[in-house]
Amino acid sequence: MTAGRFGLILSILLFTTVTLPVPGWSEVQYIDIKNPFIRKIPIAVPVFRLGAASLADDGLAREGADLLSDSLDFTGYFKILHRDSFLIGSEGLGIITPNINFRNWTAIGAELLITCGLTVVGDVVEMELRLFDTVKGRMLVGKRYKSLRPDLRRMIHKFCGEVIFYLTGHRGIFGSEVAFVSNGTGNNEVYTAEFDGHNPRQFTHTGNITLSPGWSSDAQWIAYTAFPRGNPGLYIKHRREKRGAVFSKKGVKLDPAWVPGQFQLAATLSYQGDPEIYLLTGTGKIIKRLTYNRGIDVSPTWSPDGRRLAYVSKQSGTPQIYIRDRTTGQSSRLTFQGKYNQQPDWSPTGEKIVYTGMEKGRINIYVINVDGTGLMQLTYNSGDNESPSWSPDGSMIAFSSTREGPSRIYVMTAYGTDQRRLLALPGEQKTPDWSPRAVSY
């Protein structure tokens, strides 16, 4: 068997992992992601325990444990307990229930515990990961993974996704990616990065101006506006394969927004005069015009069921956000506070819309219920904050901000807490769009 085929088989094993039996399982919601006053759960993540044949790989054991801790910490749901507080080292820690003294963990305040048995033979890594409720003394999640060393990050994140799904009932952010625009090459180009900013990669190579990336609902296509040779076009490109389409009629072509569950997208076009919103196929063919208002209509975003469309219009004199019913064609105004509201993004749960508003010369991010109630400002006194985009589960928001000078991509919880920079590349980074589902698995 060739090394390449061997590696392929091991990679397949990553996606056919073993689920360990969970005794006495019952569905309990440990974390309510809709609670704005969510309490962070204290969790202990000891250094992974090495098998007898793997003692030379203690660095990998610590690397894996640190990555697991950092990844769970990124969600904002957990308080990661410092290992100096642990009453037992990994060398004395069993990874199965009968060998764990849960009092050692509840004594330091840990309500959850993750153990891992790690075996390394050459380039092959096998991990058995378990999540425990230390108070009830039972296992909640158990998974076994086997693959090559370079897949360590993917295996860890796959387990993190299982943990989040068990504790929240939602698939979470693990495996998702963020598309954004960066000008570090001297031109505006679209890049993608993993949900936590890891592994940024240049997606377009237009050598000019590129704007407004938007993920399709299956996360396999990205639409964007580009100006190769000065001629603007709306481009639709597969994320891996060399195929796609371009809409190149005259005029403005901006703000692609994919219809959930369909190979269709809305976009702002001006080939008939004023910028209006149109519905297009994924191959760049116009299906129909969606808005017929006086003034400019831009920035479409769809409800999760695809039945309603939020957008920005100046029909009342200043940019405000409206919601259009796709069946009746009727629109109603959503925002009334402030004279300059734009860049709406509909939450994956369907209940809220996040957007940017300008007050006293500063641009900040706000969120509002789709019925117009519950308006809340999320950013304050920290430069200009723009282009908010929801995570796939609605628990977090990516956005761009000038709080450190040049524009960078940041993330925060859906309630504005835990704001931190996602990544920093040469030049500036703007207009993030969070993929609607996992991309990296």
Image (cartoon, rainbow, N blue to C red):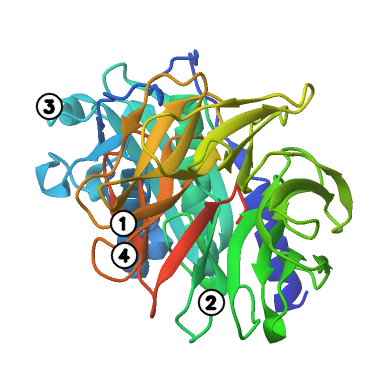
Q: Work out whether mark 1 precedes mark 3 in sequence or the reverse, and give the earlier one.
A: 3
- Name the residue carrying label 3: 107
User: Crowding at label 4, few (<14), some or many (≥20) Cα neighbours within 10 Å?
Assistant: some
Distance of label 3 from label 2 (alpha carbons): 53 Å
Query: Mark 3 or mark 4: which is in front?
Result: 3
CA–CA distance between discs 1 and 3? 45 Å
Helix, strand or loop at label 2? It is loop
Which residue matches tag 4?
Answer: 58
Observer able to see residue 49: no
Please tell me which of labels 4 and 1 falls first in the chain. Answer: 4
Q: Which residue is more in the foreground, 111 or 281?
A: 281
On the image, the x and y values in percent for residue 56 come to 35, 70
Question: What separation in Å lies between label 3 and label 4 (alpha carbons)?
Answer: 27 Å
Quarter residue 234 falls in: bottom right
- The secondary structure type at the circle numbered 1 is loop
As drawn, the label of residue 225 is none
Q: Residue at x 61, y 29 (%)?
A: 323
- Is the Cβ of the residue at disc 4 closer than 8 Å to that at disc 2? no
Whichever of labels 3 and 4 marks the residue nearer the N terminus, that label is: 4
Image disc number at residue 188: 2
Q: Going 48% across and 50% down the picture, which residue do you hit?
A: 157
What's under tag 3, amino acid-wise?
Ala
Residue type at numbered disc 2: Asn
Q: Percent x, y for residue 58? A: 31, 64
Q: Please tell me how crowded label 2 is: few (under 14), some (14-19), or many (20+) other residues with Cα within 10 Å.
A: many
Which residue is depicted at the point 45% across and 64% down? 430
Pair 1/3: label in front:
1
